[in-house]
Image (cartoon, rainbow, N blue to C red):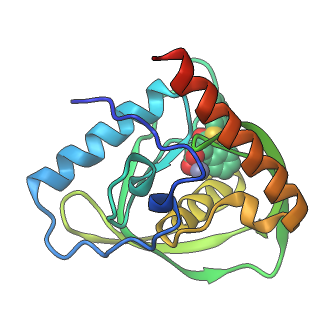
Amino acid sequence: MALHPILIHPDPRLKKPSDPVTDLSDDLRRLADDMLVTMYDAPGIGLAAPQIGVNTRLIVMDCIKEEGAAPRPMALFNPEVIAASDDTNVYEEGCLSIPEIYADVTRPREVTVRWIDRDGVAQEDTFDGLWATCVQHEIDHLDGKLFIDYLSPLKRQLITRKMVKLKRDRARDSA
Ligand code: K1U
Ligand code: ZN
């Protein structure tokens, strides 16, 4: 299993909609395992394939945060929201592609998601709480959408400028 570098915004690969999985191969299962390792290492509670530069509709998540609780790694191929509650929830979101920035985002409190699991079997489940926030954030990545796209253009511009500077500083430090 391999760790992958996570792309930092702004990057055109984070804005491009991803392609559906048509054939669930061993390579794709290995990619899911690599993404879980990369997510736990970051650390994060979710990761979408475009964040490591792969233009494929695959997300991974584990929103169990309690110390000592059993992990619940999930890999979802071709995930889609098939129902969403009218009731909403506000959560202060972060993103591994936008480090050190957090902002309130309002999303449906509950979503029903359909996906293909790693055995190629269609699954459907209803998520709530942090799981609902996370699965919507990750599916947005597959559509080229970032959580800062829910903020005002001014806030988005300020954050983008910070990220350009952060990338410049990181490139300089590693030279
Ligand atoms: O998609 C991503 O960039 C991962 C992101 C997922 C996410 C976080 C918060 C709300 C919605 C979606 C993260 O995992 S950011 C890091 C984070 O939230 C975290 C890190 C360590 C422990 C607990 C949470
Ligand atoms: Zn993200």
Percent x, y for residue 11?
52, 54
State the image coordinates of residue 156 (x, y, percent, origin top left): 80, 58
Q: Residue furthest left?
A: 26
Residue 109 visible in image: yes
Q: Nearer the viewer, residue 134 or 41?
A: 41
Q: Quadrant of residue 39?
A: top left
Up-down: is 147 above or below 63?
Answer: below
At x 55%, y 21%, the residue is: 172
Looking at the picture, does residue 52 appear above or below residue 43? below
Q: Quadrant of the N terminus?
A: top left
Q: Is residue 99 visible?
A: no
Depth check: 155 or 57 in front?
155
Please determine whether, in this image, residue 82 is positioned above or below residue 30.
below
Task: Place residue 90 in its image quadrant.
Answer: bottom right
168 or 42: which is nearer to us?
168
Q: Is residue 39 left or right of residue 138?
A: left
**x 83%, y 70%: residue:** 88
Q: Is 53 displayed left or right of 51 in the figure?
A: left
Left or right of residue 89: residue 2: left
- Total marks shown come to 0
Q: Residue at x 12, y 51 (%)?
A: 27
Q: Is residue 28 left or right of residue 160?
A: left
Image coords of residue 151 (percent x, y): 84, 63
Residue 75 x, y percent position in the rendering: 36, 53
Q: Is 2 drawn above or below residue 129 in the view shown?
A: above
Q: Quadrant of the C terminus?
A: top left
